[in-house]
Image (cartoon, rainbow, N blue to C red):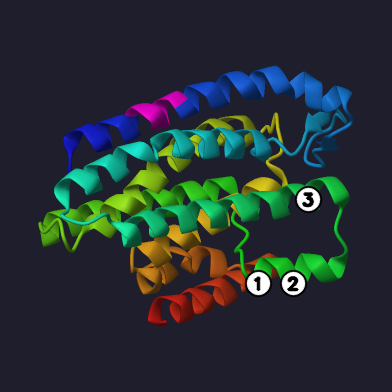
Amino acid sequence: MSLFTITTNCLLSLLGGFVSLKLIQEYIPIFIQRGHYGNDQCKVSNAPIPEPMGVITAAVYLIIMFIFIPFPLLEWTYTERLFPHDKFLAFLSAIISICTAILLGFADDMLDLSLLLRRLLPVLVPLVSVGQSLIIASSTTLYNVIQLYRLQDPIECWYNWLSIYFLLPFITTSLILYNFNKYPARVFVGDTYCYWAGMTLAAVAILGHFSKTAMLFFIPQTSEWPENSNTFTVNHQLSFSYALEFC
């Protein structure tokens, strides 16, 4: 795999984190002025906290991934005899799935969907908080790096590189959002981030052919099911990923 491609991905990831930082700082007062805010019940004051700020980082992530599309595609084209339709479709399918999840999350935040839809939609998208998603994404990245070292075959490990390409921009943008969302929270991520994070991790696990290993990374999430009803949807999603992988 080309050093230029992974270097470009790292630079774009850092750029995405920087842009997310500036945009979040700029849009905090704008969200409050437009009435998109909540209140932190753990604080004495009742100051408004902008929500859903996850849509900012999600938009930055999508732009970064769209810009990055030509780099792995050119590399695959030059290193293979035929056009890599399977790799290109895998890349696009992940982006389309993530776009759909972001749209659903934003609709949930803006339209306040009914309780029935809130229970049906997460069946295909696990809801993950920003702190948990950072831990899972970092663990998944480390797993893919170990697989690259273990396999050492570009034909077998191209999907590990594909997973890393999706995870690095996700980690940098989420890390910036976590800095604003950690206690005391200055922003709320909203359902947009939860849908985006869940679908990104699920798409990476499916395309990387390690959906069963991903179950181990979701154990802390699934172990909280008595306290959080949304965690049950993770089991649905991982079961769904098994079906997709076996098809």
Query: Which residue does the numbered mark 1 point to in the structure image?
Result: 123
Residue under the image location 56 percent in, 57 percent down: 97
The span from disc 2 to disc 3 (Cα, nearest Å) is: 14 Å
Give above or below for 236 relative to 186. Answer: below
Q: Secondary structure at mark 1?
A: helix
Name the mark on residue 107.
3
* Residue 222, visible in the rendered structure: yes
Q: Residues within 10 Å of mark 2 (few under 14, many from 20)?
A: few
Quarter holding the C terminus is bottom left
Residue under the image location 56 percent in, 27 percent down: 20
- Mark positioned earlier in the residue sequence (3 or 1): 3
Q: Secondary structure at mark 2?
A: helix
Circles 1 and 2 in contact, beta carbons < 8 Å: yes
**Along the line of sight, the residue nearer the viewer: 232 or 115:** 115
State which region is magenta.
Answer: 11-15
Residue under the image location 69 percent in, 35 percent down: 53
Q: Secondary structure at mark 3?
A: helix
Three-letter code for the amino acid on which mark 3 is drawn: Ala
Three-letter code for the amino acid on which mark 2 is drawn: Leu
Residue under the image location 59 percent in, 56 percent down: 128
The span from disc 1 to disc 2 (Cα, nearest Å) is: 6 Å
The span from disc 3 to disc 1 (Cα, nearest Å) is: 16 Å
Query: Which residue does the numbered mark 2 point to in the structure image?
Result: 120
